[in-house]
Image (spheres, coloured by chain):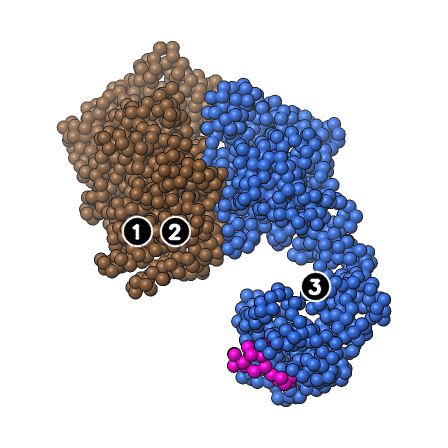
Chain colours: A blue, B brown
């Protein structure tokens, strides 16, 4: 049986095509494609995957006529290169690489410079006029070939190299000269012998050993394992192809050289030809840092025709791949060869600009542009970052969780009030706390950034920081904070109050001293344009978690389509309210409590009016009070007296209330719906404030609002039913009394596992569901988000969890509950609006998962809205189109 | 169309039969049945359910020939009773009752004494020689008839009665004499007029109005609602029947009388005829307490033939219903009538004895006996209770959760150490704490009972008390405990240290002062026999939660078939160990920790040997350390110095460790599998102790054990995998080293919701599942079991939850997770052993649910084993036979 086993390519003509991936492998098909497209890749040929299959099907033998076809291809290669395989004067050297239809780790990678032996190496010296290079190439080939084709341990060669350097008293490979390398070649050959092998001087033997090594590697344990893991069935792929390509040399004189170029500026994204060129050199010289390359323009002076060709090819490759290319090239005696082209790495800023520019250039469509930018790119360009140079030199003293992105630098303060004061006095302040509590919010807002020693990705510090758009590193457990003495200690470093510290909320790093930050540009230019396209594709809505008009304003500017979560209790901490809230808490009778609440009512009403006004036309979901009441009371001895006086009770009484409210596990305690079941009058006040705000806005300013009143922490349908009745009774009375038409919804958070399990029951009483995935994660895993720092780092380090489940939603557990509950809810009530208002709502990876469910929207902190918009668009394109 | 609409019964002959339930309703068919069986029920007749159907099908009219048939039946009734309907001398009075095929609340109940009017009432005076009785009967009839048949508000009559008593200056109805009642009759008639109605003096009009009222009530809102809720479809039942039965009178002279009798002694269960008799009286006289009845034997003297007949009928009824009967009877002029028979209420002791006796008598089979005793009966006879008389007079000052059954009395102490000391000195002690912690276990064990102000059904206090079999009331939130000053306060009551208090752990009541307790008999006699039968039917296994050999011994005596949960950390609190445990915790290096663990190893090994020895042949599941480490350290300033000295570090160091270990929500913190992932050396030590114990027992005593090593708090398969590897490596090495054959299992608790959701994944790595439903409930609801006392009582009071979910498993939420996880697990691994080791494992109601799942066993505290055995047997009979 005669068959074509070998496909040749050279000089703009290839026997293969891009479509022959299955037969030639990905790499082989690509080489053929580029050749056909006129890109001057070095010539070579591909042995088909069918040979690999034949080999294993036929007791590890080759097809009879393979040798003949390979020999013919080598002959052809000699012809087009003008070199001879094994020729001692002008030796043809080749690389040998594997390549299946799917790229697959575990297979043999590359053998370079095959064709070198004791004779041809002299030819290489002649050709390149560089003895050191030739012998370095030879010893490298000996090492690669010995290791890969003959199984001689890599370390044996490395040890010999180290020994030689030690004997010579030098440190770097580059300190070895040609004579050293010649000696090393002899030593390497001895290593072959030690293992009972002989280095083949016959170049054809070299070639066949390399081909066999590639084919063997198809059945290596790692390759088999990889196919198993990725569900690639036996027989689905024929096998691997073998690519044999002529080596080219940039160190053959002044009409030779090597370089790397980009089709655009990878830093700014500007459409310019950009790159570096080193004349009379090989790539290794650049990598080893022996010589410093010139800007690409230098090549124009030195080898103008090759430069012109390169520019033309750059444009062609970019147009062909429709993305910015990173191209390696070599000029051998005036002839340009493209060794590699790939999509170029770029900065976030460049990524966005390039994607937008390419749409304007007609190169890609909007959908492609939207898919091409990473959500993290958006995040990066919207937050401050460190000056790159200063950062390089800065000392990292600790690492915590990257809780809120961006860089911040400031003088550290441990007390939130003091931090606030110093900030008011004009200082740049970094607030450092063991952990934060609602009392610290003022200080957090005044600070440049927040650093805590405890807490996880959804701890108080993290959630509030993201809400404020402040950089934050939390749960940096190695830091010991001594508030009283006013210093922090980490390892041997001690930083005192008032001294400088810097944090990177994007990476979690903590730097000693001051590191200058660079301000971001904001939502304008290409970013804004890209996001407007994202909105065209997005099927998942994006709302904001916003508590006050200021947040709502930011949210709108960033493109939020409503508020998914307004935490009413955050308003309770403001200076004019907290005494009233506390009076409400220490009330001994319903009447006392109602009196205190009556004072809060007009204030909350104004809050809601502000929020509704800012969000006009868009839905606003307001959650009734959620945290346990003790969060509003002081816990430290010193504050007791002050607070007691403020609310007009004795210190003893206050202490007793604090003690009575004390809980062992407050996250699982008397909070959320449980609070308003005990004190329905709080729900009544809040409902009044919401409904009155909507009524007054309608009457006074003609603004129509449909408030969505949300009950937190519901686990049982009866809880929802009980409070829903209270809300509806209160609301309907007010509406009737004011004689207006006003629609409102009453829905529930789904954040308790039981609520997810019984979502079909709960949906009967709910107008909407909003998944509080922070609490849901907390309870589904049984991980306290405030304490998780004690073991989560270890879980991630040991690979027990792949991700922090408070950062990226746990798709297998928590995610399944979200999915199931959404489905159960919508089965009962088709129009049930379902969203996510946990921190996962702003996390791109989580959004990707949410898009696979029946959720209607996600809600994120204002500063994460742009990221969420992009991620939602990408998810919609991938899963819902 | 002529049809039989009316079925007559009298004097041992009835037209109907027991099989005609659909036609005659339940009550009518029963009356027919009893009549046919020769039981002398008063004569009467039943109007069929078809009449009701006809009525509604035919525009609310009756069948043409109904009146004729009813009249004929009345005639017949007059004949057999020798009385006349409307006859002024010997009036026939009847009762009218509804009765469908299914008993149904919402329908009209009863009108008594129908047939009374201004004339016949005088006949009744004559017949009974009791004017007061006759007019009282008349005014009652007026009230019932007016309310039920004519819709006159009940309250109008009640108000008139109250007014009359007020005018006369008396309090009780019985203080009114015949003249008063005559006046009341007139006033009642005025009330009829006020509502535009006239009381019909015509007895036939009375009868037809009552019949119509019954038939109307079939379509009352409440009855319709009831049928809706219970899924009774329209047309499934024909309608209601109407039962018209002659009234009989026990107050017609000395050959008349009334009484109640039991076929056995309802207090002890002894097989004797037991009851009370009141000559020349009606039931109302007994109820009103006007006269004191005699023992039944009195009747033998007074009306011997009726007595003999009654005895004979008692035996017959018991044999017929195959259960102890509670029988109401009346003798009218020497003739015995049975008014009602029903299964008698009885004490727990009696219930058990009767069930067992009846099997021996051949009356019922074992299965019936097992089903007839309530699990709570078993519980009651196995725990101490209060002297009934003292209890009646004792003052209840608070109520908490009934956490561990039984009664206890003692002098109160607030400090566990002091309680222990006083108990050693011979005092009866009741330990009172705000809440308990592991440090209190010694004091709890020494106390008669435990009372806490905080905590739920699975709080530390509750769980430990049940484990120790000590009565406990927990979460009595109205009690304020001042430890420092040494008193408790509840309302106005103050009880000081050393004063007496009593608690009932079965009801949750707290009594002021000393209330004497009575000891139980233990597992012997009828209880033991009944439980041995239960085991014959039981398909669900019953294991014990036992930590030490002493518990295991109790468990075996009570019939446990293995240990489902041994909490290894309970051993850590013993005096000789706690310093070593603490040294292990404060260790700064792995080496220091391993050194401390090495000291614990031989102690733990001996513990396990003791446990294995006690349980020989039965499986023992041992859970690796579960609680967070800070539970083992002191938290109060005073103890710090002592402990620091004990373990040889400075107070500062100790404080720092305590602070570092501090958690905001320890239930969701660094505990369970998370601990041993951080410190695998603890798992290594515990595994060694378990495996070495098994090896040594095998070698030294020839006892074969298959230890089941259980990993707590697993939420992710990788957690289990990680520690399972550590356990297996350690165990296999030891086994190899000792050259023995030893099997062991490695399984996991399912107590984190995520574990239930991903049970199919986790089953791949587990040999068994054990559901920790305490934690599962805690996390599924998001209810901290220690803090739930703050809102759960309100939830129960407001009907938001039907039951405390820590007491009875929540079948809709938590139960569904258990069911689903068991199914998922067994799908992956058919032989996966699945049990419940949470407190629900000892709760009969929960066991009923568990029996509907695929669970293999439940595990309960030793003292609840008997209850669990019975409940499991009942569940198996109901759901798995």
Q: CA distance from mark 1 to mark 2?
A: 13 Å
Around disc 3, counting alpha carbons within 10 Å, would you say few (fewer than 14), some (14 to 19), or many (20 or more)? few
Q: CA distance from mark 2 to mark 3?
A: 50 Å
Say yes or no: labels 2 and 3 on the same chain.
no
Q: Secondary structure at mark 2?
A: helix
Q: Are marks 1 and 2 in contact (CB under 8 Å)?
A: no
* In this rendering, position of residue B66 left or right of residue A411: left
Q: Give the image quarter of residue A643.
A: top right
**Residue at x 62%, y 26% (from the top left corner):** A575
Answer above or below: position of A527 versus B226: below
- Please name the residue that numbered disc 2 is placed on: B594
Magenta residues span A188-205
Comparing B243 with A783, the one in front is A783
Residue B582 in the image: x percent, y percent? 38, 43
* In this rendering, position of residue A42 left or right of residue B289: right
Q: Secondary structure at mark 3?
A: loop
Q: Secondary structure at mark 1?
A: helix
Residue B669 in the image: x percent, y percent? 47, 44
Instruction: Identify the chain of the residue marked 3, using the numbered disc in the image.
Output: A
For marks 1 and 2 on the same chain, the one whose residue lies earlier in the sequence: 2
- Please name the residue that numbered disc 1 is placed on: B602
Instruction: Identify the chain of the residue marked 2, using the numbered disc in the image.
Output: B
Say yes or no: labels 1 and 2 on the same chain.
yes
């Amino acid at each position: 049986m005669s068959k074509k086993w070998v496909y040749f390519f050279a000089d703009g003509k290839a026997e293969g095509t891009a479509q022959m991936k299955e037969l030639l492998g990905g790499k082989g098909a690509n080489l053929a494609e580029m050749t056909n497209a006129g890109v001057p890749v070095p010539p070579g040929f591909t042995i088909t995957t069918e040979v690999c299959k034949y080999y294993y099907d036929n007791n590890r033998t080759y097809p009879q006529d393979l040798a003949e076809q390979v020999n013919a291809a080598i002959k052809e290669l000699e012809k087009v290169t003008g070199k001879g395989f094994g020729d001692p004067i002008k030796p043809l050297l080749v690389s040998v690489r594997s390549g299946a239809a799917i790229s697959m780790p575990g297979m043999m990678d590359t053998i370079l410079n095959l064709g070198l032996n004791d004779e041809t190496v002299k030819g290489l010296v002649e050709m390149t006029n560089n003895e050191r290079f030739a012998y370095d190439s030879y010893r490298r080939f000996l090492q690669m070939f010995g290791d890969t084709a003959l199984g001689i341990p890599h370390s044996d060669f490395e040890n010999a190299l180290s020994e030689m350097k030690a004997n010579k008293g030098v440190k770097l490979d580059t300190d070895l000269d040609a004579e050293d390398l010649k000696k090393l070649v002899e030593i390497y050959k001895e290593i072959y012998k030690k293992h009972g092998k002989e280095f083949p001087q016959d170049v054809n033997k070299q070639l066949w050993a390399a081909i066999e090594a590639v084919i063997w590697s198809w059945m290596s344990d790692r390759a088999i394992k990889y196919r198993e893991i990725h569900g690639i069935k036996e027989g689905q792929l024929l096998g691997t192809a073998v690519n044999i390509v002529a080596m080219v040399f940039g160190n053959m004189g002044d009409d030779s050289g090597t370089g790397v170029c980009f089709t655009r500026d990878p830093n700014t994204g500007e459409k310019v030809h950009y790159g570096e060129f080193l004349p009379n050199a090989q790539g290794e010289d650049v990598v080893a840092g022996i010589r410093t390359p010139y800007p690409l323009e230098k090549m124009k002076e030195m080898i103008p025709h090759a430069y012109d060709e390169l520019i033309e090819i750059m444009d062609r490759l970019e147009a062909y791949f429709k993305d910015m290319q990173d191209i390696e090239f070599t000029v051998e005696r005036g002839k340009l060869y493209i060794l590699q082209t790939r999509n170029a790495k770029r900065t976030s800023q460049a990524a966005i600009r390039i994607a937008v520019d390419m749409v304007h250039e007609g190169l890609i469509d909007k959908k492609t542009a939207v898919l091409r930018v990473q959500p993290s790119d958006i995040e990066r360009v919207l937050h401050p970052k460190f000056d790159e140079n200063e950062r390089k030199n800065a000392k990292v003293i600790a690492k915590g969780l990257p809780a809120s992105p961006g860089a911040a630098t400031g003088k550290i303060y441990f007390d939130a009030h003091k931090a606030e004061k110093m900030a008011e006095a004009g200082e740049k302040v970094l607030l450092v706390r063991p952990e934060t509590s609602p009392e610290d919010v003022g200080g957090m807002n005044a600070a440049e950034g927040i650093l805590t020693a405890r807490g996880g990705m959804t701890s108080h510090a993290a959630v509030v920081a993201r809400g404020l758009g402040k950089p934050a590193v939390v749960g940096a457990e190695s830091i010991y904070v001594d508030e009283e003495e006013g210093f922090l200690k980490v390892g041997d470093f001690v930083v005192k109050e008032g001294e400088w510290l810097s944090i990177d909320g994007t990476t979690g790093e903590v730097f000693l001293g001051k590191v200058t930050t660079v301000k971001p540009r904001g939502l304008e230019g290409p970013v804004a344009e890209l996001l407007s396209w994202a909105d065209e594709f997005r099927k998942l809505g994006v709302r904001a978690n916003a508590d006050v008009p200021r947040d709502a304003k930011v949210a709108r500017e960033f493109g939020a389509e409503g508020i998914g979560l307004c935490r009413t209790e955050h308003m309770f901490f403001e200076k004019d309210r907290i005494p009233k809230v506390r009076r409400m808490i220490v009330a001994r009778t319903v009447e006392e409590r109602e009196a205190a609440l009556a004072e809060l009512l007009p204030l909350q009403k104004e809050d809601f009016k502000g929020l509704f006004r800012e969000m006009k036309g868009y839905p606003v979901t307001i959650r009734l009070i959620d945290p346990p009441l003790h969060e509003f009371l002081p816990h430290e001895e010193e504050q007791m007296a002050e607070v007691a006086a403020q609310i007009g009770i004795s210190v003893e009484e206050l202490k007793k209330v604090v003690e009575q409210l004390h809980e062992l596990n407050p996250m699982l305690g008397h909070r959320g719906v449980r609070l308003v079941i005990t004190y329905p009058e709080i729900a009544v006040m809040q409902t009044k404030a919401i409904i009155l705000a909507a009524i007054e806005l309608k009457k006074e300013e003609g603004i129509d609002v449909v408030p969505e009143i949300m009950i937190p922490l519901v686990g049982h349908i009866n809880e929802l039913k009980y409070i829903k009745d209270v809300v509806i009774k209160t609301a309907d009375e007010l509406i009737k009394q004011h004689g207006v038409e006003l629609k409102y919804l009453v829905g529930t958070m789904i954040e308790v596992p039981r609520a997810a399990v019984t979502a079909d029951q709960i949906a009967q009483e709910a107008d909407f569901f909003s998944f509080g995935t922070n609490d849901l994660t907390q309870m589904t895993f049984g991980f306290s988000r405030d304490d998780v720092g004690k073991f989560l780092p270890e879980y991630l380090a040991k690979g027990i969890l792949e991700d922090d489940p408070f950062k990226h939603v746990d798709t297998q557990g928590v995610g399944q509950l979200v999915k199931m509950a959404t489905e159960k809810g919508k089965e009962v009530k088709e129009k049930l609006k379902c969203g996510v208002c946990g921190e996962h709502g702003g996390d791109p990876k989580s959004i990707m998962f949410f898009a696979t469910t029946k959720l209607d929207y996600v809600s994120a902190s204002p500063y994460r809205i742009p990221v969420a918009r992009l991620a939602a668009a990408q998810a919609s394109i991938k899963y819902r189109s």
